[in-house]
Amino acid sequence: MTMNNSYALITGASSGIGAEIAKKLAKKGYNLVLTARRTELLENLANEIKQKHNINVDLISKDLSKYEAPKEIFDFCEENNYSVDFLVNNAGYGIKTSFHETSLEDEEDFIRVLGTSVIMMTKLFLPKMIKKGNGKIMIVSSVASFAAPSAIQPLYGPIKTFMNRFSDSININYKHKGVTSTAVCPGFTTTGFHTASGVQEQMDRVPKFLVFTAERVADEAIEATLSGQRLCVPTKTYKFLVFMIRNMPQWILSLLGKILAPGRYNQ
Ligand SMILES: NC(=O)c1ccc[n+]([C@@H]2O[C@H](COP(=O)([O-])OP(=O)(O)OC[C@H]3O[C@@H](n4cnc5c(N)ncnc54)[C@H](OP(=O)(O)O)[C@@H]3O)[C@@H](O)[C@H]2O)c1
């Protein structure tokens, strides 16, 4: 265990992009606080990382759909004197059930995990970052924030768009105080996301040239966040696609969506 009390905190660290980010930040020498709901996966990852790197790794299992979770995570860091200089807001999922069939609670939980908890975590950890004049915030958003409205998960894209704007605002307001925020917008990435969201079948139909590894996404996301970029779209393929999306009429966008991600854009 190192004596350094500077930490990176990663939400959604139990699998996929979050787990890869954890491994890569450990390699860079960051102490880690890992959080997600599945304790056993967090423990396995913590052990794997500790065997390879001389850093401190701690974990706290929390469900970010619960209002009190961000404050409990913050308090855990305070009690242990972990100074969080790198905050990764990564936890997320998708809802397979059609919007008219979900419960109000389902949608509220969704907004809380992907949106409200991100704002709360950022708000809680920001003041100390400002005080230190040093802080990196990463918000894992999605290419869906730029894409045409999706037939599945109607709230997913809009919340991610909101998160991009939120990240931008934090960045503009606090970069002169040494705190930057980066919205990371991955495209299709091989993780537990599609199985967890019940859309693995649609994912399997996405052309292979549009699917990248979590490792690749994590690499680009970390470098962009460390250099204080406001927006990161990992891979040249998605950089090009996002450029096109932003400059394309909506009807072409919807048509491309139907061709490239069948089942997702079927209106
Ligand atoms: N995979 C893609 O194609 C893709 C594309 C663009 C953007 N993204 C974004 O990337 C981020 C990471 O997703 P991923 O692809 O790595 O998927 P993943 O492998 O399913 O990982 C999602 C992580 O979020 C955590 N999580 C989910 N619900 C949670 C809750 N209620 N409370 C606390 N943690 C929760 C999960 O942990 P537990 O289940 O253990 O709680 C897991 O660690 C998400 O924000 C997603 O929207 C993914």
Image: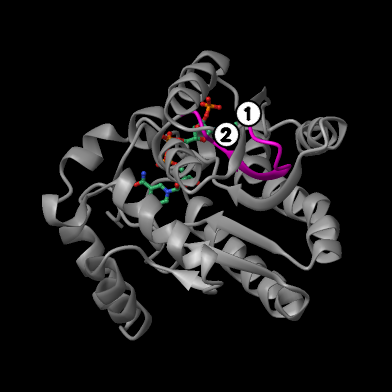
Asked if marks 1 and 2 touch (Cβ < 8 Å), the reply is yes
Q: Kindly indicate the quadrant of the structure image that contains residue 20.
A: top left
Residue 5 among magenta residues: yes
Mark 2 Cα shell of 10 Å, populated few (<14), some (14-19), many (≥20): many
Question: What is the number of callouts on the image?
Answer: 2
Near-viewer residue (48 or 163): 48
The range drawn in magenta is: 1-14
In this view, 167 is above or below 7: below
Percent x, y for residue 154? 48, 51
Percent x, y for residue 29? 53, 45
Q: CA distance from mark 1 to mark 2?
A: 5 Å
Which residue carries the number 2 mark?
55
In this view, 14 is above or below 264: above
Q: Quadrant of the N terminus?
A: top right
Q: Quadrant of the C terminus?
A: bottom left
Q: Is residue 142 visible?
A: no
Point 71% across, 37% down: residue: 3
